[in-house]
Structure formats: C-alpha cells, structure tokens
Image: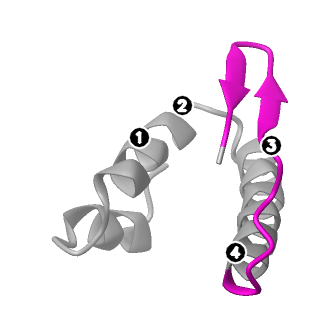
Amino acid sequence: MITEDMTRAFNDPAASSWLKQTMIEAIKRDPVDCANDAEILAALLRGRADAMLRGKPGHGLYVITGSLTE
C-alpha cells in the first residue's frame, strides 16, 4: 500500500532521487521489517552526521560487497 504521504514525498521536487529510489524499493518489502531497518539506518546516519559536525569522522565501514571509506 502506498500512502498519501508517500505519494506527496515522491512527487516533491525537493525530495532527493536517493529517497525516491529507496521508497520504490521499500514498498516491495515487508512494511514492518522495512520500518525497523529505516529506524536503524536513521540512527546510524544521525550518529555519523553528529560525528562529522564535531570533526570526528569515522573509520571506513567494511561490508560484504567491498569497503566504504570516508
């Protein structure tokens, strides 16, 4: 199910293409699992942003498909 809020966000020209693509992928998933993952991701990204603002960037993140670095 796609909510009115999702439709509004998707049609917002100020919304990033990343957000729109993520919403497209999210509606294919179990909504509870997706919402839980989104909360975790938001907390992780908020922590990263806070660290960057304090001038303490992280150390790269290794993932199965390769590595992400700062």
Which kind of residue does numbered mark 1 sit on? Ile
Q: Which residue is mark 1?
A: 24
The residue pinned by badge 4 equals 52
Whether label 1 touches label 2, CB < 8 Å: yes
First to last magenta residue range = 53-69
Mark sitting on residue 33: 3
Mark nearer the N terminus (1 vs 3):
1
* Residue 24 percent location from the top left of the image: 41, 40
Is 50 left, or right, of 69 in this rendering? right
User: Which class describes the residues within 10 Å of circle 3: few (<14), some (14-19), or many (20+)?
Assistant: few
Disc 3 marks a residue whose amino acid type is Asp
Query: Of marks 4 and 1, which one's residue comes earlier in the chain?
Result: 1
Asked whether, in this view, residue 1 is left or right of residue 7, the answer is right
Mark 4–mark 3 Cα distance, whole angstroms, equals 29 Å
Q: Position of residue 20 (x, y in %)?
A: 35, 52
Q: Position of residue 41 (x, y in %)?
A: 75, 56
x and y percentages locating residue 32 in the rendered image: 79, 49
Q: Which mark is on residue 61?
A: none
